[in-house]
Amino acid sequence: FLFIGMSNEFGEFESGVLAALIGATAAVTLGGVGTLLVVAAIAVYVPKLRDLRTIETPDALQAGHSSAG
């Protein structure tokens, strides 16, 4: 709980500092571009995620049921 709470606070702090340094519009644009770069990197380095269609719950896995036909 502490780490999740701190990550939110730290993210707000970082966004505010960046906006103060380069302006709000540039900070939002940079954040969006950064998000797209992270998504692209994950798509390249973890190709199984691109093919993921359903997420099975642990209960379904233990029971031997599969939602993928």
Image (cartoon, grey):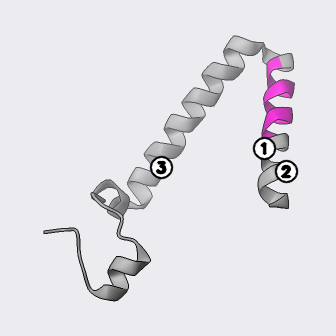
Q: Quick one: label 3 or label 1, which is nearer the N terminus?
A: 1
Number of marks drawn: 3
Residue positioned 55% across, 29% down in the render = 33
Per the rendering, the mark at residue 8 is 1
The residue type indicated by label 1 comes to Asn
Q: Nearer the viewer, mark 3 or mark 1?
A: 1
Residue positioned 30% across, 59% down in the render = 52
Q: Residues within 10 Å of mark 1 (few under 14, many from 20)?
A: few
**Considering only vertical position in the picture, is 47 above or below 8?**
below
Instruction: Give the spatial CA distance, label 3 vs label 1.
Output: 23 Å
Q: Residues within 10 Å of mark 2 (few under 14, many from 20)?
A: few
With 1 as the anchor, is 68 left or right in this view?
A: left
The image quarter in which residue 65 lies: bottom left
- Residue underneath mark 2: 6
Q: Nearer the viewer, mark 3 or mark 2?
A: 2
**Considering only vertical position in the picture, is 58 above or below 48?**
below
Do residues under tags 1 and 2 come within 8 Å of each other at their CB atoms? yes
Per the rendering, the mark at residue 41 is 3
Find numbered disc 1 in the image and state the secondary structure of the residue it sits on: helix
**Considering only vertical position in the picture, is 36 above or below 43?**
above
Q: Quick one: label 3 or label 2, which is nearer the N terminus?
A: 2
Q: What's the magenta region?
A: 11-19
The residue type indicated by label 2 comes to Met
With 37 as the anchor, is 21 left or right in this view?
A: right
Instruction: Give the spatial CA distance, label 1 vs label 2.
Output: 5 Å
Q: Residues within 10 Å of mark 3 (few under 14, many from 20)?
A: few
